[in-house]
Image: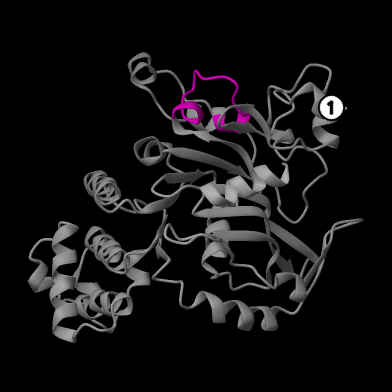
Amino acid sequence: MTESAHRREIDESILYIKDLRTYFYLPERGRFLRAVDGVSLTVKPGETLVVVGESGSGKNVTMLSVMGLVSGAPGIVSGRIWYRRPEDTEAVNLLEGLDRFSRVVHEPSPSVEKDTRGWERWHDSGMKERRGRDFAMIFQNPRNALHPFFTVGQQVSEAVRRRSPEISSSEAMEEAEGWLARVHLDSPKKRLSDYPHNLSGGMCQRVMIAMTLAARPKVLIADEPTTGLDATIQSRVLDLLEEMKAELRTTTLVITHDMGVAKRLADRVAVMYAGRVVELGDAKEVLDRAYEPKHPYAYGLLGAIPTVDDIRSRRRLSVIDGDVPDLSRLGRGCQFDSRCGVKPPGEEERCSEREPELEKVGPNHRLRCWLHVKEEALA
């Protein structure tokens, strides 16, 4: 990418992640687990980017890295995360100074030298004012994310006062009631005095959404927002996220392994596998089984979703054989190599020896696959 194209990507995005790497050291194995290994993503103001993939694909760690909430060492070891508020003219690098604390060696094997404690002190000093205001996260298990010893009203009103410290406690509580009403929680005034254990899972999820939106973040990250909820509550939560996006124009990143959720919410989709983005593009292209070209892994994920015709004909669902690879023992080639059934004829060795780049195959569509790589990239 040229310098001008790189600058344009930053200027057009509210969030621009470039070559992010987040590793964890496994002392019992004496190796690094490469949970996120060179991820690059852009998110434009007001859009919804959905990140999909199996458990272990790196999607959760990517978003925790953005929030600065990775707790294992060494954590983020390299990369850039540029963030620009809509009203700002210049983007800021949220990982500014990382090079002073971390050094990565890739050959002959990945190794890291990092002052983890020094980096955490430096990074937290800049991120603590951004969490809740610029970035907010709806966690996968809302009951665990809510504080058990504080009432719903106390927790939501705290988010309100963090955004607007000048308002009084009574005003913050009144606004908290309004947010509970906006997320369609029944009897919002009564719920202010409830504790999390008094609420169902779906109600806790809506309280979490209310608390997150009350801070009016510029970027909202939703981690598996429908996991563990029954079908009716799932639909209501998705309705709520769509409604809030239309009303508040919040930029949203959704993490999910549910392709149905992706189809419902996404403007663009990133498919992750083994710590890498393997397909990235507009939702209408990535989530359409009939659309070509497509990464074999993305095609396999879509093939596991039953269609009306599948049900009527009682057709067996397709499966992706094998498991996500051990992220501490990644090979040199395509990480999907051992599970792929559509390798280029006569080119099987290349798939196992060289990893393809994330190549542009359309105006807004990129793939990491030798089946669709441009000829000039082979030189």
In the displayed structure, would residue 157 be above or below residue 16?
below
In the displayed structure, would residue 270 be above or below residue 313?
below
Q: Is residue 275 visible?
A: no
Q: Quadrant of the C terminus?
A: top right
Q: Nearer the viewer, residue 60 or 211?
A: 211
**Residue 24 percent across, percent down from the top left:** 69, 66
Q: Is residue 246 magenta?
A: no
**Residue 321 percent across, percent down from the top left:** 62, 33
Q: Is residue 304 left or right of residue 30?
A: left
Q: Nearer the viewer, residue 42 or 140?
A: 42
Q: Which residues are magenta?
A: 284-298
Residue 181 falls in image quadrant: bottom left
**Residue 356 percent across, percent down from the top left:** 76, 35
Q: Quadrant of the N terminus?
A: top right
**Residue 279 percent across, percent down from the top left:** 60, 36
Q: Is residue 323 left or right of residue 202?
A: right
Q: Give the residue at the far right of this rendering.
A: 108
Q: Residue at x 51, y 50 (%)?
A: 13
Q: Is residue 297 magenta?
A: yes
Q: Residue at x 40, y 52 (%)?
A: 251
Residue 367 falls in image quadrant: top right
Q: Is residue 29 left or right of residue 146?
A: right
Q: Which residue is mark 1?
A: 378
| Colour scheme | one colour
Q: Is residue 246 visible?
A: yes
